Each structure stands twice: as structure tokens, then as C-alpha cells.
């Protein structure tokens, strides 16, 4: 608890903290409880809006436009910091875990922030000492509870630290899941370095030299892409590509998938899962998230006929919106680099998409 760890062995030295990578040597709750609430809240703000180090930026391909990454509030940044720009793949359950952890971290942050703002000026500066605090004395001597008045400032500070500990528990869980994705990326990088050198990570080399064929042979395609591209190939009348490219047209593929979202085409459970993975990965920050449409896609054959009928006005999205959203993401998928972009298919009205319906 507070107090016991804060004296001799505590955080005495006032050394300027060196910037750390995400998840690197996070202090324990006991160490953090030795701080004043004001100092600790500053630490929490730093954790919540992580400033990537130069080697994190290059490793994860984080654009310079993002100075700080609010990983629990912004799902696009959450996926970016997991390695989405490097082609990291997510299973449906990994996506669900990440979103659950980030939601919990954000909820706990709101709570600790509210507690901090409610503190008195004295409580904000209160620092536990090596001597037991009056509250600890009260807890220790049950017989004399009436005779010892707990210090109200210490009580306030303890309420803050309890809330801060709950935030840190949620934060550690979220960061653990992110760092696990970095481990997958490093393992993939190591395998690529042993087999293919830099071509595996340099997009230009890949497109110009081998149209992606070497990579397609070297690595299994992500499960969601394999499933959806097979459905498209089988049901859209696509001609097999001489170049060995996976698809004939990203524009047509995106329009086809938008028709799947709108219930125009029957889906197997595996296809539903694959489509949901793509929708999650293509999150554009517009507030139309996978939770709002999961039931729509997963309950096939029951009215209403698709996402357009979800009552919440912010979720009313056109077929063209879904086609564009998925197309923008598909353009970044390494296995599809050599496929013609064909944006023209997205610009027309939906009637010209019906040739396969």
C-alpha cells in the first residue's frame, strides 16, 4: 500500500526520465504511489499519449504527422502502433481483445482524471512517506478506530492512487497485447531477412521487381484475404490473372465486398468473420465501427436488409461509403500491391455493380 515503499528504497533521485519505448520498464504501483498525485497524473498522461521514439517510428512506419499516439482512444492509431502499416495481421479474437483492452483503459483514464480534478490543492501535492500514514494506523489498530482521526488529505490522495492503479492495470494489459504484436513482427522480419533480404519490407522493390509473386509464394496470405478473394473469384466472374496477381481489380473487389456488407450476397460463417476482420482493419475513425454492424452481418436472412437501416443516424452509411472505406485499406495490403487500383468502379452508381448480383 501507500507509504511502506516510499522511504529509503523509493524514488529518491531526481534524474530526468529518459524517453522509453512503449511498454519498456513500466514502474510498479508501489513505485508510482510514492509520487504526488500531480506528478503521477503527468506520468499517466504520458503513457496514455505515447510519443514514439525514432526507432519505433521506423520499425512501425508511423508517419511524422502523429507526434503523440493516443492508443486507447483512437483505434486507427492503436492498429498503427501494433504494426498495421507493416502488414501485421490480426485474428478476429486479437482484434476483439485489443478493442476491449483499449476501451477499458480509456474508461479507467476518465475515472482517474475525474478523481484528480476533484482533489484539493493539498491532496494534489501530498506525498506518502516511509512512516505509516494515519489511514494505515487506523487499519492496523482496530481497537482504537474512534481515537485516531485519519488525515483527510491522505485519504483523498489514497482515493486518487487507487483509481490510478486501476488505470495502470488496464494500461499494462493493453500494452502487453501491443508488444506481443511487435514480437510477431520481429519474428517475421527475422524470417524474411534470412530468406529474402530487404525485398520483404520495401514496397517499391516488391512491386517493380516481382509484382508481388515472390512474396505471395514466400508467405501465406492472411486468412481473411484468402477467404474473401476466393469468394470474389468464384462469384464475380473474375478472369484468372496471367501475372499471377491475386485479383483483377481492387475497385471491383471493394464494390463486391460492399454488396456483401449490404446483405445482397449470402455469406458463410467463415466469410462473415473475414469480412468483419476487414471492416475492423479499415476503420477510418468515422465512428462506424465493427460493433455497430456485427449483428447485421452475422444474422443473415433476417430483415432489415443491411447496415443502411441501423437506426442510429451516424451509422447510416451508403454502399459507396463501404466500398471506398475497404478500397482505401486494400490499397495498403502488401499482397495486393500489384493489383490495378481501378477507382473508376467506385465512382459510378451502384447499378453498374450489379453485374454479379
Image (spheres, helix red, strand yellow):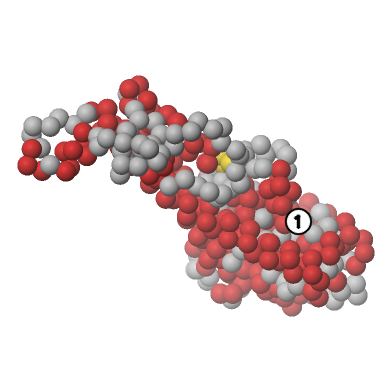
Q: Quadrant of residue 63?
A: top right
Which quarter of the rendered picture does the N terminus lie within? top left
**Residue 157 visible:** yes
Which residue, as the protein is rendered here, is positioned at the far front?
A: 8
Q: Residue 251: percent from the left, percent from the top? A: 79, 59
Toward the viewer: 316 or 187?
A: 187
- Residue at the spot 73% in from the left edge and 66% down from the top edge: 190
Q: Residues within 10 Å of mark 1 (few under 14, many from 20)?
A: some
**Residue 323 visible:** no
Q: Residue 6: percent from the left, percent from the top? A: 36, 38
Toward the viewer: 43 or 10?
A: 10
Q: Is residue 197 above or below residue 75?
A: below
Q: Is residue 311 left or right of residue 34?
A: right
- Residue at the spot 68% in from the left edge and 62% down from the top edge: 186
Q: Residue 279: percent from the left, percent from the top? A: 62, 59
Q: Which residue is mark 1?
A: 332
- Residue at the spot 60% in from the left edge and 38% down from the top edge: 18
Toward the viewer: 248 or 63?
A: 63
Which quarter of the rendered picture does the C terminus lie within? bottom right
Q: Residue 7: percent from the left, percent from the top? A: 35, 36
Which residue, as the protein is rendered here, is positioned at the far top?
A: 121
Toward the viewer: 357 or 208?
A: 208
- Total numbered labels: 1
Q: Is residue 151 above or below residue 316?
A: above
Q: Is residue 190 above or below residue 108?
A: below
Q: Quadrant of residue 323?
A: bottom right
Q: Is residue 220 above or below residue 317?
A: below
- Residue at the spot 63% in from the left edge and 50% down from the top edge: 81
Is disc 1 placed on a helix, strand or loop?
loop
Q: Is residue 72 left or right of residue 319?
A: left
Amino acid at each position: 500500500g501507500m507509504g511502506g515503499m516510499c522511504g529509503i528504497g523509493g524514488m529518491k533521485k531526481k534524474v530526468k526520465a529518459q524517453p522509453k519505448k512503449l511498454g519498456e520498464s513500466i514502474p510498479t504501483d508501489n513505485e508510482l504511489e510514492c509520487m504526488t498525485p500531480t506528478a503521477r497524473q503527468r506520468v499517466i498522461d504520458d503513457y496514455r499519449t505515447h510519443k514514439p521514439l525514432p526507432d519505433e517510428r521506423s520499425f512501425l512506419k508511423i508517419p511524422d504527422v502523429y507526434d503523440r499516439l493516443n492508443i486507447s482512444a483512437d483505434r486507427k492509431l492503436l492498429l498503427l502502433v501494433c504494426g498495421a502499416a507493416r502488414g501485421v495481421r490480426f485474428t478476429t479474437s486479437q482484434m476483439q481483445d485489443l478493442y476491449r483492452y483499449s476501451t477499458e483503459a480509456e474508461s479507467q483514464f476518465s475515472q482517474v482524471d475525474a478523481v484528480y480534478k476533484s482533489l484539493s490543492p493539498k491532496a494534489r501535492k501530498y506525498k506518502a512517506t516511509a512512516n505509516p500514514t494515519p489511514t494505515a494506523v487506523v487499519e492496523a489498530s482496530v481497537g482504537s478506530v474512534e481515537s485516531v482521526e485519519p488525515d483527510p488529505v491522505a485519504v483523498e490522495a489514497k482515493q486518487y492512487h487507487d483509481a490510478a492503479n486501476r488505470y495502470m492495470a488496464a494500461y499494462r494489459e493493453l500494452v502487453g497485447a501491443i508488444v506481443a504484436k511487435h514480437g510477431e513482427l520481429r519474428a517475421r522480419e527475422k524470417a524474411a531477412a534470412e530468406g529474402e533480404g530487404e525485398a520483404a519490407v520495401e514496397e517499391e522493390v516488391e512491386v517493380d521487381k516481382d509484382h508481388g509473386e515472390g512474396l505471395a509464394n514466400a508467405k501465406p496470405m492472411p486468412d481473411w484475404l484468402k477467404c474473401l478473394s476466393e469468394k470474389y473469384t468464384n462469384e464475380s466472374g473474375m478472369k484468372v490473372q496471367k501475372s499471377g496477381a491475386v485479383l483483377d481489380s481492387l475497385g471491383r473487389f471493394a464494390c463486391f465486398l460492399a454488396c456483401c456488407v449490404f446483405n445482397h450476397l449470402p455469406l458463410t460463417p467463415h466469410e462473415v468473420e473475414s469480412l468483419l476482420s476487414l471492416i475492423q482493419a479499415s476503420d477510418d475513425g468515422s465512428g462506424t465501427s465493427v460493433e455497430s454492424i456485427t449483428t447485421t452481418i452475422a444474422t443473415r436472412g433476417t430483415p432489415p436488409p443491411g447496415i443502411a437501416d441501423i437506426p442510429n443516424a451516424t451509422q447510416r452509411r451508403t454502399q459507396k461509403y463501404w466500398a471506398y472505406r475497404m478500397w482505401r485499406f486494400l490499397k495498403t495490403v502488401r499482397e495486393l500491391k500489384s493489383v490495378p487500383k481501378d477507382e473508376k468502379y467506385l465512382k459510378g452508381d451502384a447499378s453498374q455493380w450489379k453485374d454479379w448480383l
